Image: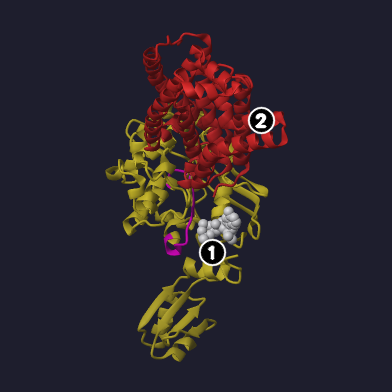
Chain colours: A yellow, B red
Amino acid sequence: MLPRLRARAVSPAREAVIGPGEDPAVVLAAEGAPQHSHRRRVEPEPVAGHDSQWWNRDGIAMAVLAPAKHTVRMGNVITDGEIVVSGLTKHYKQVKAVDGLSFTIKPGRVTGFLGPNGAGKTTTLRMILNLVSPNAGTATIGGSRYADLAEPLRAVGAVLEASSAHKGRTGRNHLRVICAAAGLPASRADEAMELVGLTPAAKRKFKGYSLGMRQRLGIAAAMLGDPRVLILDEPANGLDPEGIRWMRDLLQKLAGEGRTILVSSHLLSEMELLADDVVIIAAGRLVAQGPVAEVMGNAGNVGTVRVRTPHPDTLLGALDGVGSSRGDDGALVLTGVTAEQVGDAALRAGVAIHELVTERPDLERVFLDLTAGKEAIR
Amino acid sequence: MRLVRSEFLKIRTTNVWWLFALGAVGLLVVAFAANALNMHFVLQPPTEAGQTMDPEQAAVLKALADPVALTSYMVTSGQYFGLMFVMLLGIITVTNEFHHQTATTTFLATPHRTSVIVAKAVAGGIFGIVLWLVTTALTVPATAIFLESEGITPVLGDSEVIRAVLLNGLAYALWALIGIGIGVLIRSQIGATITAMVVYTVGTAAVSIIVNLLVTALDWDWLANVQWAMPSLASNLMTSGANLPGQPAYWVGALVLVGWAVVTGLVGTLLTRSRDIS
Ligand SMILES: Nc1ncnc2c1ncn2[C@@H]1O[C@H](COP(=O)(O)OP(=O)(O)OP(=O)(O)O)[C@@H](O)[C@H]1O
Ligand SMILES: [Mg+2]
């Protein structure tokens, strides 16, 4: 049995270790937060009864997960939650599924883990979680290997593909089994069911769950220990549009609380909405990593301006030093200018404009460009 | 400790355990009736049969008719199927994890896989012992009634009888461990259960027959002892209570059984530790 400590009672100790100044959320703000974060990095709302912002980060979890009365033992709570993968390699008989892969996942941000089918994403995530043993390299979470975490479920939550529940067991009992193994009170099972909206199906057997319900149960299982690090392998699988949006909001909220979120997905438009950073791999090797905007910028795809006019040549004459090409529909596609410059030039030249849009490259384009030429399924 | 609780919860939250318990108790009734019938003829041998009996067989019968042997024999009724169900439950606690793909969840909660196997062994062992308690609670009064009706005073308090009953409990626990070992070795649920049941039923008989044939053909008496290496025969030997002529002592059976449980458990644990879960 664990010593019965209140979650809040242990936090001062944590504060002593890192101190509020090193609160990842605060650090982010101090660094002038990357471009993407303005979309949402909302400061957590104060929770009644707590006196400092620091508590609120933990307090948020309670707001999300209903009052978390469970105990948290100090010493297993990951304080920074950085995931460091270094030189990770896994050979299967015919393929090098993962080949000398290194990257770092920062806390307080949602990181998208992208790659074509068979790129080695699932294998990498399973190696991070000690389910698959690497042939070489290491993976640490908050500085320790997964197997060395004293209370893994309170530190790391994971939703993996091909994780499932006993067909004849109810969803609630499935979570209770995990609670028992992790030393969490059984009441957490109900709270997590509530969080993912499965309460109405809590007492039904798993075999009767739909794909989306199964996925939600997996997310509930990952949230049981109120973990600081979340690792999700294609969590949007089977979720309805409402569910996908719910998950996006949840993950962004959790990241806003300073947690580390690593999520693999094929839904690139979804990723563009969700992720702050991306790690792109292909054929088991790293292709690109960094903040989304940076990766898209580095891909040499800085955006274009599309303009439709009856007098393209006149307009081009008014704009000098601009790269141009013809779109399929006869529109001009200009690079190296802004829409404002094009509009002003058109006014000066007295040409009518029927359409003027800035086209930013989307993640999908960048992804396809970056992974083109790499052998996909091996 | 909390792992054992979790494993128990796993057993308790599915239907398998009570189906197995029901099956074991149901077959216990059948087995007890069959044993009673059998012993009835041992105690009152039809006269013609008694005359044609060869001396060795007669000696065995005489040993069996001894109240102590008789009481232990009856009290441990239902062992054959009881042990089989305990073994099957042990197998299922492991193979379920792969069959239902819950191994990922389990090993995420407990990255130390050895602890998971140990917890399964403890939970399975406790299930075995509970089943043993239930069967013994049924066989003790039934034995008393049966022996009284045959005009024999049951010697339930005899130390050898108590030893047989306790060793029977040990057998129930050990068979759960053997089941877990088999489950880890053969991860496929169907594969493991079928293999185990075939070996347990047909295999045991086959080994007995083959060994006996070889003994008669080659005249190597020591070969007869090979059959006691079969776990099912070994557990039979262990709980026989009395030392029947021509059989090794009961503790040989106990050793063989412990050996099997330890070997399957160890090999299974080592395999589980290094295996990729995907
Ligand atoms: N258990 C295994 N045995 C043999 N090969 C495997 C095994 N697991 C994965 N592989 C191989 O390793 C490579 C990487 O697989 P992985 O599942 O990690 O890809 P992925 O990036 O998750 O793909 P997807 O997007 O389709 O989920 C593939 O070529 C796959 O065939
Ligand atoms: Mg995958």
Q: Quadrant of ligand 1?
A: bottom right
- Picture coordinates of residue A359, whole percent (x, y): 44, 73
For the residue with label 2, is its CB less than 8 Å from the closest atom of ligand 1? no
Distance from the alpha carbon under mark 1 to that under mark 2: 62 Å
Within-10-Å neighbours for mark 1: few <14, some 14–19, many 20+: many
Q: Nearer the viewer, residue A289 or A25?
A: A289
- Picture coordinates of residue B2, whole percent (x, y): 47, 28
Q: Left or right? Give the position of A214 relative to B183.
A: left
For the residue with label 1, is its CB less than 8 Å from the closest atom of ligand 1? yes
Amino acid on which disc 2 is placed: Ala
The stretch in magenta equals A256-270
* Residue B12, visible in the rendered structure: yes
- The image's mark for residue B224 is 2
Q: Is residue A269 magenta?
A: yes
Q: Secondary structure at mark 2?
A: helix
Residue visible at 63% across and 19% down?
B249
Q: Which residue is mark 1?
A: A116
> Residue A347 occupies which quadrant of the picture?
bottom left
